[in-house]
Amino acid sequence: MSNEQTFIAIKPDGVQRGLIGPIISRFEARGYKLAAIKLMTASKDHLEKHYEDLSEKPFFPGLIKYMGSGPICAMVWEGRDAVKTGRALLGATNPLASPPGTIRGDYAIETGRNICHGSDSVENAKKEIALWFKEGEVQTYKSALHDWIYE
Ligand code: DAT
Ligand code: MG
């Protein structure tokens, strides 16, 4: 199955640091297909829903403030094993624990400024895509590269 979808977001620090292009390039170069993209400044309510599993953590208020501090580049990327491989492309939550070659390992230092988000399971990807995108904003199309990337 090559149509698994994941929600990938470039956080306000990644947008401000001019990393939209480099991050998109890595997903494109790996062979993933962009299914949706938009720039949006998320409300507190929206971000509290997105991170509801973390609401009891001591860093939660700071996380919500940081995520709401500017525009986020929200995306849906599609392809085989997109959720797990998307997380591998991002690297570990703590950038200092991420090897060079990963996005966080190449561009970030602190956990609280780790520049990108990726869904951690297929189920959460579905929930996140539904939270960030309306129906009709996620495109269905066959990439011209499909048969060069998949057997
Ligand atoms: P990930 O973003 O790798 O899925 P997560 O879901 O556990 O990690 O946490 C969401 C975000 O919250 C993470 O990207 C950065 C922030 N965060 C996590 N742990 C933190 C901590 N110990 N201190 C500060 N921020 C933290
Ligand atoms: Mg997470």
Image: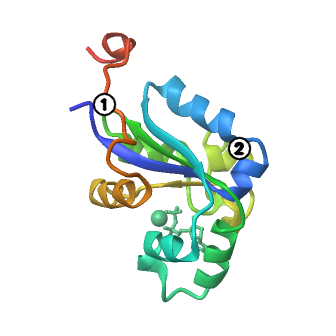
Q: Dot 1: what SS? A: loop
The quadrant of the rendering that contains the N terminus is top left
Residue 102 left/right relative to 54? right
Where's ligand 1: which quadrant? Answer: bottom right
Residue 96's place in the image compared with 90, above or below, is below
Three-letter code, disc 1: Thr
**Mark 1 and mark 2: Cα distance apart in space:** 32 Å
Q: Dot 2: what SS? A: helix
Q: Which residue is found at the position 31% from the left and 30% from the top?
A: 140
Q: Position of residue 38 (x, y in %)?
A: 54, 44
User: Disc 1 vs disc 2: which is toward the camera?
Assistant: 1
Q: Position of residue 63 (x, y in %)?
A: 63, 75
Residue 85's place in the image compared with 143, above or below, is below
Please tell me the numbered disc located at residue 46: none
Quarter-wise, where is residue 60 in the image? bottom right
Q: Position of residue 82 (x, y in %)?
A: 37, 40
Residue 3 left/right relative to 48? left
Residue 36's place in the image compared with 60, above or below, is above
Q: How many labels sit on residues?
A: 2
Residue 97 left/right relative to 131? right
Please say if the residues under marks 1 and 2 sit with CB atoms less than 8 Å apart. Answer: no
Mark 2: few/some/many CA within 10 Å (<14, 14-19, 20+): some
Work out which residue is located at the far left of the displayed protein and give it: 1
Q: Which residue is mark 1?
A: 140
Q: Earlier in the sequence, mark 1 or mark 2?
A: 2
Q: Which residue is found at the position 36% from the left and 10% from the top?
A: 148
Q: Which residue is mark 2?
A: 106
